[in-house]
């Protein structure tokens, strides 16, 4: 059954796994400095790995950092931030090249790699603020051992393009009315620009469903259209979408 907790865990896992942008603040050195992370994700052991430009982190030692992550909606015409993530973590910088094939294809002298350890993260998203513990997330070895295929978010977005904006808007209203399985993540009165009246956007996709944002002249609502069962991989995602659309 789709729940806000499952959605929050999925967003957190994917932001930390490379789907979002990430920056770090070296708390033990200068808490006012924010350093961009060039690449990040989980290695084959399930450890979180970051890669930063050498010039940005050359003087940093192992220690505490604050991680700040952002996940954007899968839209090109409108810049929408659907979630932000914040966590205090420990980073252990690696000497030389770190074999993180999922991040960088070949060794480079311009990047410095670090292994990040954290207990939990705070996710800010349409449902409000959620505390997500790393123990609740499944990635790395656990996901690969289960034979789960990662979902290509942009390819999944193209599947929803075929559905069309009009049908997506109808699905959004059906979830709002409780006719279609899903979650109402947010529904509030908010003055909107006239050109946003009657718009619907695809905010996010994952194995459990897809998130929609709809706006009126004085209202904005966010729903999660749920699947009957998790859809691993693009083929299963397309099948699940067809089942929901009818």
Image: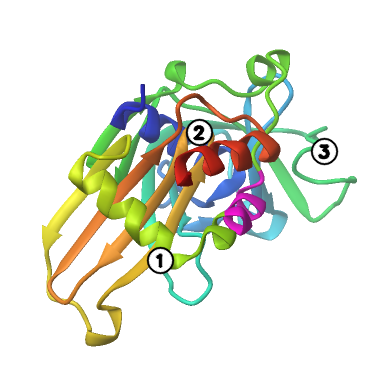
Q: Taken as a whole, is the magenta stretch helix, strand or loop?
A: helix
Q: Going 32% across and 34% down the picture, which residue do you hit?
A: 181
Is residue 158 part of the magenta span, yes or no?
yes
**Compared to 76, does 103 lie above or below?**
above
Counting residues from the N terminus, which is met first, the one under dot 3 or under dot 1?
3
Nearest to the observer: residue 139 or residue 192: 192
Label number found at residue 96: 3
Q: Going 29% across and 79% down the picture, which residue do you hit?
A: 196
The furthest residue to the left: 189
Which residues make up the magenta segment? 152-159
Q: Position of residue 211 (x, y in %)?
A: 40, 49
Mark 1 — residue? 166
User: Whole-Å distance between the Cαs marked 3 and 1?
Assistant: 52 Å
Nearest to the observer: residue 37 or residue 16: 16
Mark 2 — residue? 13
User: Whole-Å distance between the Cαs marked 2 and 3?
Assistant: 27 Å
């Amino acid at each position: 059954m789709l729940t806000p907790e499952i959605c929050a865990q999925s967003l957190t896992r994917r932001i930390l796994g490379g789907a979002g942008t990430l920056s770090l603040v070296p708390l033990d050195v200068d808490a006012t400095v924010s350093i961009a992370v060039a690449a990040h994700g989980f290695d084959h052991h399930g450890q979180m790995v970051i890669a930063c430009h050498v010039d940005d982190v050359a003087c940093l030692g192992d220690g505490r950092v604050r991680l700040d992550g952002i996940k954007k909606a899968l839209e090109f015409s409108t810049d929408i931030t659907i979630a932000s993530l914040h966590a205090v973590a420990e980073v252990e910088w690696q000497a030389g090249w770190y074999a993180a094939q999922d991040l960088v294809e070949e060794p480079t002298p311009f990047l410095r790699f670090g292994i990040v350890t954290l207990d939990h993260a705070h996710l800010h998203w349409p449902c409000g603020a959620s505390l997500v513990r790393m123990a609740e997330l499944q990635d790395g070895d656990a996901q690969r051992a289960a034979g789960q295929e990662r979902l290509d978010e942009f390819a999944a977005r193209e599947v929803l393009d075929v559905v069309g904006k009009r049908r997506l808007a109808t699905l959004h209203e059906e979830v709002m009315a409780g006719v279609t399985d899903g979650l109402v993540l947010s529904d509030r009165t908010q003055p909107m620009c006239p050109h946003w009246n009657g718009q619907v956007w695809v905010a996010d996709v994952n194995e459990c469903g897809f998130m929609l944002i709809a706006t009126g002249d004085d209202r904005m609502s966010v729903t999660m259209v749920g699947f009957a069962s998790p859809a691993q991989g693009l083929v299963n995602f397309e099948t699940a979408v067809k089942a929901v659309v009818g």
